[in-house]
Amino acid sequence: MYTIGIDFGTLSGRALLVDTRDGSEIATAVFDYPHGVMDERLPSGKRLGPEWALQHPQDYLDVFEHTIPAVLRQSGVDPQQVVGLAVDFTASSPMPAKADGTPLCFLDGFKDEPHAYVKLWKHHAAQPQADKINAVARQRGESWLKRYGGKYSSEWFFSKLLQILEEAPAIYREIDVFIESADWVNWQLTGVLKRNTCTAGYKMLVQDGAYPSAAYFAALHPDFGDVIAAKVKGEFAPLGGKAGTLSEAMAAQMGLPAGIAVAVANVDAHVTAPAVKATQPGVMVMIMGTSTCHIMSSESMEEVDGMCGVVDGGIVDGLYGYEAGQSGVGDIFAWFVDHAVPPEYHEAAKKAGLNLHAYLEREAAQQKPGEHGLVALDWWNGNRSTLVDVDLSGLLLGATLATRAPDIYRALIESTAYGTREIIEAFEARGVEVKELVAAGGLPEKNGLLRQIYADVTGRTLKLGGSSQSPALGAAMHAAVAAGVYPDIHAAADKMGKLKDEVVTPIPENQATYNRLYAEYKTLYDYFGRGANDAMKRLKKIRNEVRGE
């Protein structure tokens, strides 16, 4: 028997056909979103303001149409042997829709309206609304705020919905259902609207089975008091459960049998835990790509400063699931390579037969820790944990006329490792032990220097996920549970999960140097991040004023 996991990322969607007996990856296909990330203008040409990041839901439907027939063709597997499928998704990436599931942006009257589209996870233009959500919660003494590290983010569900109400009330009135894209694609697959407990808990303020009170929402805006009944319909469904069965229409489009199990949707980071056998307490999984999400389960519920949330059963049933993260990691390296590397390095990389990332990694690996004299703050896309502040920006300190591109490339990698260490220390300060680190995703798969730096900076051995597409594998594992192949995700992880044999161990002399550099990072972190010097925010304000935005 086989299952299919469909991983919806920031720029593309991937389908993975998996053998449920042992997790063997039989075939994969990727479809790049035609609309990509809309952060400058809509398809119509209408310009977007700063900090916007939208997507088009048609791209998600196109992923099903292109990738699933492709993996069936590649594999030669009889579609009748496929017993289930599951999706994972970036989060929080919600969209406004009508009662029948039609996204507002599909309708002629709304194609030129930015608020009618999916607000991608890295849409940061709802920061004023996030500030209000936090201020009102503190004024009212709302107890749930502590479970989100004391701050609700602009990246999350209600910040984005409140932004629509305040900036485009006519659009808000047209919304029948505001829904995470993960749950929307399942709705299209099954015809059934259900909301997964993962995004409900981490992004939608659902704690102990309930939303905050109507009085709290009304305190945010008089027209927000009935937001749950009016805009956020749908029952909760647990991870590993069955959301429904594949409809006749979608089955015909994809070449699969109608009626097979469709698992409850999940978040891309969280679904990765079982794929790397991290279903036990104290194992922190770093899902490293354009950003990094840190997830971990524990037997106890603690309130950890600056975390993205703690949810009962948020990762695996029976344990409290913690989430933290860094808003930019791979995106930072890509920014540097795309915009700041001199031509001679492009030419040298070409001569060496390497892409620019690989060439800079090779050159940077020849240095000892501290040799470049630099330290950087990893805030090029804001700070998710532990400061929860999208208005922060990047910083590089120590540059001279002798500083070279490989020096900066290494310093940027180190900065992201320091950010991870800050998160680990925040957990352990509250008594949540981090026993093991597991790295998954494209970055640790490709970059040996990065793997060693993370081990040296954190002072911990680093295990590596055994699949280059762990989220899709994790989704396929949840599909196996939903289809009844395994009784629970623990059993599926035991048979289908993968780790590499390689373990990266800290080098003591490197670790000693990085302890000194991390102390410098922490000084800058607190100085620029905790209000002593708000220069980054003042610069953004000046930028926006000059642009007239």
Image: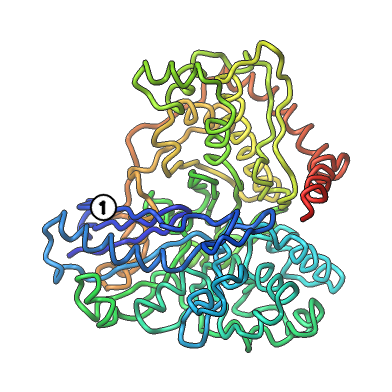
Number of labelled discs? 1
For the C terminus, which image quadrant?
Answer: bottom right
Question: Which image quadrant for residue 419?
Answer: top right
- Residue at the image point whose x is 75% and y is 27% from the top: 520
Where residue 524 appears, as percent x and y from the top left, is 78, 33
Q: Residue furthest top?
A: 402
Where residue 341 appears, as percent x and y from the top left, is 55, 24
Q: Residue 374 or 120: which is nearer the viewer? A: 120
Q: Residue 165 or 504: which is nearer the viewer? A: 165
Reading the image, the residue beneath label 1 is: 28
- Residue at the image point whose x is 49% and y is 43% from the top: 288
Where residue 246 appears, as percent x and y from the top left, is 29, 78
Query: Mark 1 packing: few (<14 Cα in 10 Å), some, or many (20+)?
Result: many
Residue 320 visible from this viewpoint: no
Amino acid at the residue labelled 1: Thr
Question: Which image quadrant for residue 472?
Answer: bottom left
Where residue 77 appears, as percent x and y from the top left, is 13, 61
- The colour scheme of the drawn protein is rainbow
The answer to whether residue 211 is left or right of residue 101 is right
Residue 336 visible from this viewpoint: yes
The answer to whether residue 41 is left or right of residue 499 is right
Q: Residue furthest front?
A: 45
